[in-house]
Image: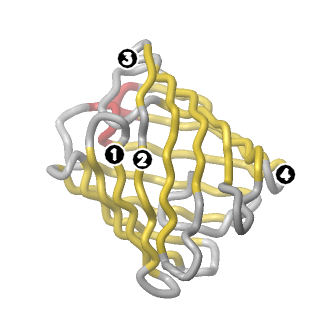
Amino acid sequence: MLLGSSSLRRFSFSGRFVDTEIDRPRWRFTADYLFHPRVNAGLEFNPGVSEVGIRGNIRVLDESRFKPNLSLGTSSDRIGSPEGTQCYYLTAAKTIQKLPVSPYVSVNYSEWEEGFTFPFGATVKLSKNFSTLLMNDGRKPHAMLNFDSGQGWGVSALWIWFERAGAALTVGF
């Protein structure tokens, strides 16, 4: 849930801008609280449509050598979806041993689509502080280049739908 940051903090705040004419995804701000190492929840504000929504994540299963990380969550539906639509997901993610790659796959119920989508992607660690995320949200592709400071903040360069540039900043403490 933290763009540009892999280290969860008790409180985290993020802001995102996407160069698009669509009001809802142009600006997004989030505030999250880590209630427990496995449970976080927060709010999302989309000022272009004066929308406030809930988001949250529960880690059901920790990743081990042979098992993936499993998590359940909810957030606003994918980028470009109409105001007031939420999604609910189950995600499995696994770091590939001896490689800097962590693929994931989700089963996602989309209120917008009134049905299921199947997002997938992979994070590739490029160095200690840099990673890239290549993904498909169940309908459209996206790419991110992330810098994690390791000190509670990070930035991301976004390529939404492989046609729109964006940027995100995350701060946690």
Q: Quadrant of residue 158?
A: bottom left
On-image quarter of the C terminus: bottom right
Q: Residues within 10 Å of mark 3 (few under 14, many from 20)?
A: few
Q: Earlier in the sequence, mark 4 or mark 3?
A: 4
Observer-nearest of 159 and 89: 89
Label 1 is placed on what type of residue? Answer: Asn
- Label 1 or label 4, whichever lies nearer to me, is 1
- Cα distance between the residues tagged 1 and 4: 29 Å
Give residue 62's position: percent from left, percent from top.
76, 56
Q: Do the numbered discs 2 and 4 sit on residues whose CB atoms are within 8 Å?
A: no
Q: Which residue is mark 2?
A: 120
Residue at x 63% of width, y 80% of height: 151
The residue tagged 4 is 36
Residue sitting nearer the eye, 72 or 32: 72
Q: Amino acid at mark 3?
A: Glu
Q: Please, which residue is most extreme toward the right here?
A: 36
**Residue beneath disc 3:** 113
Farthest residue toward the front? Answer: 66
The earlier-in-sequence mark between 1 and 2 is: 2
Real-space Cα separation, disc 2 to disc 4, in angstroms: 26 Å
Instruction: Find residue 136 and name its label.
Output: 1
Q: Amino acid at mark 4?
A: His
